[in-house]
Image (cartoon, rainbow, N blue to C red):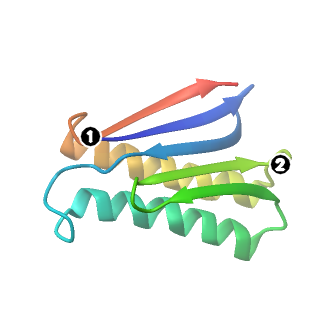
């Protein structure tokens, strides 16, 4: 199961952490894991490409680990990109259930 924790402070995004693989199907066939990867990685790449926001990033592909931390308050563009990511992840969690994706929010 993939666990994604979205970090917020006073309803402002601070970052997120993604751990483990979904386990929906075997490696190379897991559409849930692939969907989660596309949403999270595209969000990070889009923030890097389309905003001036700074962030720290730690990843381990084999472990299915991503840690993304904004260095400052997010710009409006970054807020929209993260809202879009959360929306997509919520849809995946609803469609496939908590067995494959657990999405939670943590106040930091």
Q: Where is residue 53 in the image (x, y as percent from the top left)?
A: 82, 60
State the residue lying farthest toward the left: 25
The structure residue drawn at horizontal position 62% and vertical position 71%, both measured from the top left corner, is 45
Q: Which of 6 and 78 is in front in this view?
A: 6
Say which mark, if any, is on residue 71: 2
Q: Quadrant of the C terminus?
A: top right
Q: In which quarter of the image is the N terminus?
A: top left
> SS class of the residue under badge 2?
loop
**Badge 1 element:** helix
Please give the residue where the numbered disc 1 appears in the rendered image. 94
Whether residue 42 sits left or right of residue 51 in the image: it is left
Who is closer to the viewer here, 105 or 58? 58
Q: Relative to residue 19, is residue 7 depicted above or below?
A: above
Structural crowding at the residue carrying mark 2, measured as other residues with C-alpha within 10 Å and reported as few (<14), some (14–19) or many (≥20) = few
Q: Residue at x 14, y 61 (%)?
A: 26
User: Where is residue 80, by image quadrant?
Assistant: bottom right
In percent of width and height, residue 54 lies at 82, 59
């Amino acid at each position: 199961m993939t666990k994604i924790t979205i970090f917020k402070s006073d309803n402002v995004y601070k970052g997120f952490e993604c751990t483990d693989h979904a386990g929906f199907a075997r490696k190379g066939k897991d559409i849930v894991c692939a969907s989660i990867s596309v949403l999270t990685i595209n969000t990070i790449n889009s923030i890097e490409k389309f905003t001036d926001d700074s962030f720290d990033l730690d990843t381990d592909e084999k472990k299915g680990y991503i840690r993304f931390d904004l260095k400052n308050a997010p710009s409006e563009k970054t807020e929209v990109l993260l809202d879009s990511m959360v929306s997509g992840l919520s849809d995946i969690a609803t469609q496939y259930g908590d067995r494959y994706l657990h999405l939670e929010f943590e106040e930091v």
